[in-house]
Image: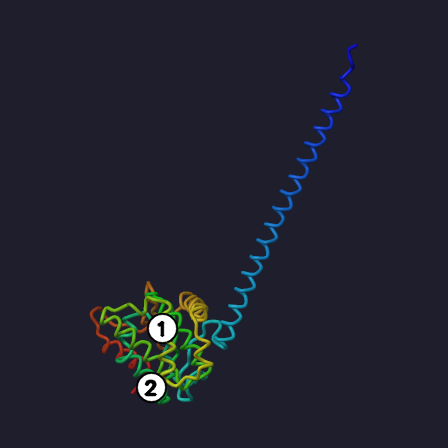
Amino acid sequence: MAKNTKGTANNDIAARAAKMRAEAQRKERNTRIAIWSAVIVALLVAAGIIIWAVSQGDESDRALGDYSNGQPIVVTKAGVGTKVDDKLPTVDEYISYTCSHCAHAEDPVGKPLAEAAQAGKINLRLHLVDTAHMPWIEPATAAAIILASEAPDKFLSFHHDALEFMLAAAEKQDASVVTDPAKSLEKIKSMLSSLGVSQNIIDKVDAATGRRYLDASSKEWTNHKFENQPEGLGTPMYAVNNSVVSTKDGGTVADLKNAIFEAAKIK
């Protein structure tokens, strides 16, 4: 007698279907878990990056002190980092530590202006900005700003040395240091050590601090409105009482120095 197997077959099919649905649901749950795990890891990584960036910014702000908004370094008879004397002419000098023209103008123009400020004849405001960019500029700028804040008596010596090194590199056509971030930082710290700067100050010098200052100072420079403003900004640039001083085409560095001194009535 033939047996009725239809019900058994249906039961087997139903069981297999149930098993397949359970397996599909398990895989779906595992996929959701994997996706959420990846999202959580990504969020944690992002949060870590944000925290690191904020902490780096905070460290740079602390190192920059009063110069965190890109303020110029003021040189007067009272010293470096002092207040402007409103009774005196104010000379604004815009320079870059990687500008060979700035380096070339330091001895004939920059030093005499610093000496005039120290003698009480003018206020000198040094604006460190970013032109002719090379990796040398960040640690050099960081060192200058930190010195102006924490060791002002060392600032001018370092300032002259940093530009002198850039001039030598340009004249020798040897950019091996100034185009290498690690070598630039090492050389800057070595220069500071030679000047007798304390190690705790030297340890604060890094590229990030210099970059933070340069972004702020360069923005202020490009947004500032001068009298006799040229069509394009470049370094070195000098302004006396907010009026840009320049020479005629073909003018020499000596002509530029004389024009600045005449405009500022420096004798």
Up-down: is 189 above or below 38? below
Q: Between residues 124 and 49, which one lies in front from this camera angle?
A: 49
In the image, taking residue 86 as reference, residue 114 lies left or right, namely left
Quarter of the figure with the C terminus = bottom left
Colour treatment of the image: rainbow
Kind of residue indicated by mark 1: Tyr
Q: Say which mark, if any, is on residue 174.
A: none
In the image, taking residue 220 as reference, residue 58 lies left or right, namely right
For disc 1, the marked residue is: 94
Q: Between residues 29 and 185, which one lies in front from this camera angle?
A: 29
> Residue drawn at (69%, 32%), measured in percent from left and top?
21
Q: Quadrant of residue 7?
A: top right
Label 2 sits on a secondary structure element that is helix
Q: Position of residue 264 (x, y in %)?
A: 33, 81
Label 1 sits on a secondary structure element that is strand
In the image, taking residue 151 as reference, residue 46 lies left or right, namely right
Kind of residue indicated by mark 2: Ala
Q: Position of residue 209 (x, y in %)?
A: 45, 71
Quarter of the figure with the N terminus = top right
- Return the disc, 2 or 1, that comes first in the chain's sequence: 1
For disc 2, the marked residue is: 116
Q: Tag 2: Cα neighbours inside 10 Å, few (<14), some, or many (≥20)?
A: many
In the image, taking residue 206 as reference, residue 250 lies left or right, namely left
Q: Position of residue 39 (x, y in %)?
A: 60, 50
> Residue drawn at (33%, 63%), measured in percent from left and top?
232
